[in-house]
Image (cartoon, rainbow, N blue to C red):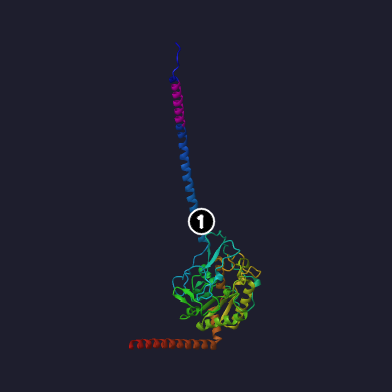
């Protein structure tokens, strides 16, 4: 009898093979799973390490930026401004003064076209853009004068052997534009009253308004009501390119005369217009050049020569590079100075001055001028009182008529 083969052995074989395959597959998966677990754990730990490293990097950059700003930019000093304990804040970027009574100007808000950082002048200080590269601020330098900038004129004050301290400025008033605001904020001065406005210029002095803690006033209003010993004036940078030159001298003299009218016992120190770094002046503002600076300084000195109570401070003795231009590393935008150079300016003021005795002798030599000035001041005060009284009577009359009706 012939044996017939059943399919069952084959099925068993297939089952065994299939089962073996499944077993091997399961075992492989099991082994593979065992191998992956430490890889996933390592990846998790690596990801956490990267996150921690990133956090540390952010903290280092942030803290480093804070420390950099602390050491490279001095904060404003506790200077009295219009007899107020706090400084008036200037909001926003600078605005064009055209068509506005507020002393602002886009001429001082233009960022440098050739500098290493994007900067704007904000309330007289240098503010860096967050996206700008760090600028290496020069270290403090000793006050050195340039012989090439010396001027032989009796009204140009010479350096004295003995300097004064900050108490010399206790009863002084500082008037000027954003450069003077920078001096207030970053020179280290601790005494004095400041009447400053960004964009302030000689032109239309009586119409320009400065922002103070006590409200918006004119410079002339700020000089009323208190007698100062010294007036420091720093203007002219915003007059470059605006004036027919023949109009500048009489206009500048009239401003000094008005200051003297309001402050007959005060000596007026007139600061020269500081040179600019022409390589950093933005396109469209080419009139901010050193030829114009020299021209306007010539008129300023001429005004000082003609008015006995005004004296000239030749700041370019320390800010010139020796070739009739601003020291190349003194400014980020070609106009406004770094804090260390403003500290040099303060040292300059402390060694260039007239003593109280010397100026008292000058006053004694001009008794008629003082008497006339005092008489005019009294007359103007009386006229002002009469106008106020007339205005009060007029208002009272209007009230009476309203009541009667």
Residue 44 belongs to the span the image colors magenta = no
Local SS, label 1: helix
Residue 82 location in percent, x, y? 46, 75
Q: Nearer the viewer, residue 226 or 59?
A: 59
Asked if residue 354 shows in the view, the reply is no
Residue depicted at x 51% and y 57%: 65
> Farthest left residue?
404
Residue 314 location in percent, x, y? 60, 74
> Farthest top residue?
1
Residue depicted at x 50% and y 72%: 166
**380 up-or-down from 311: above or below:** below
In the displayed structure, does residue 292 sit left or right of residue 49? right
Q: Which residue is mark 1?
A: 64
Residue depicted at x 66% and y 72%: 148
Residue 3 location in percent, x, y? 45, 13
Task: Name the magenta segment's main secondary structure.
Answer: helix
Tell me where the magenta segment starts and ends, as one range. 10-28
In the displayed structure, does residue 51 sit left or right of residue 348? left
**113 up-or-down from 24: above or below:** below
From the image, which quarter does the C terminus lie in?
bottom left
Q: Nearer the viewer, residue 23 or 276?
A: 23
Residue 22 belongs to the span the image colors magenta = yes
From the image, which quarter does the N terminus lie in?
top left
* Residue 238, quarter of the rendered image: bottom right
In the displayed structure, does residue 401 sit left or right of residue 34? left
How many marks do you count on the picture?
Answer: 1
């Amino acid at each position: 009898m012939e044996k017939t083969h059943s399919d069952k052995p084959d099925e068993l074989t297939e089952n065994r093979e299939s089962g073996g395959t499944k077993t091997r597959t399961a075992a492989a998966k099991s082994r593979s799973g065992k191998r992956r677990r430490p890889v996933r754990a390592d990846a998790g730990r690596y990801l956490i390490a990267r996150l921690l490293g990133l956090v540390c990097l952010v903290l280092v950059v942030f803290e480093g930026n804070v420390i950099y700003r602390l050491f490279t930019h001095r904060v404003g000093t506790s200077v009295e401004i219009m007899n107020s304990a706090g400084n008036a804040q200037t909001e926003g970027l600078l605005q064009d003064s055209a068509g506005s009574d507020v002393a602002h100007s886009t001429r001082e808000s233009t960022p440098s076209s050739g500098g290493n950082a994007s900067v704007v002048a904000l309330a007289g200080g240098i503010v860096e853009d967050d996206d700008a590269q760090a600028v290496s601020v020069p270290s403090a330098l000793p006050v050195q004068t340039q012989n090439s900038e010396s001027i032989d004129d009796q009204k140009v004050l010479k350096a004295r052997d003995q300097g004064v301290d900050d108490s010399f400025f206790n009863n002084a008033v500082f008037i000027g534009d954003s450069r003077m605001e920078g001096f207030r904020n970053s020179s280290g001065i601790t005494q004095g009253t400041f009447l400053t406005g960004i964009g302030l210029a000689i032109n239309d002095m009586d119409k320009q308004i400065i922002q103070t803690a006590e409200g918006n006033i004119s410079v002339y209003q700020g000089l009323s009501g208190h007698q100062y010993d010294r007036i420091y004036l720093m203007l002219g940078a915003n007059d470059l390119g605006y004036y027919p030159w023949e109009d500048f001298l009489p206009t500048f003299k009239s401003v000094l005369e008005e200051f003297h009218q309001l402050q007959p016992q005060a000596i007026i120190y007139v600061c020269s217009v500081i040179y600019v770094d022409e390589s950093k002046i933005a396109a469209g503002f080419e009139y901010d050049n050193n030829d114009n600076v020299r021209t306007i300084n010539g008129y300023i000195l001429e005004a000082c020569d003609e008015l006995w109570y005004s004296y000239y401070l030749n700041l370019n003795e320390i800010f010139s590079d020796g070739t009739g231009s601003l020291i190349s590393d003194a400014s980020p935008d070609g106009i406004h100075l770094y804090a260390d150079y403003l500290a040099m300016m303060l040292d300059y003021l402390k060694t260039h001055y007239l003593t109280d005795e010397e100026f008292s002798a000058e006053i004694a030599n001009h008794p008629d001028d003082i008497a006339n000035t005092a008489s005019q001041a009294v007359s103007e005060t009386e006229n002002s009182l009469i106008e106020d009284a007339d205005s009060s009577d007029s208002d009272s009359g209007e009230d009476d008529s309203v009541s009667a009706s």
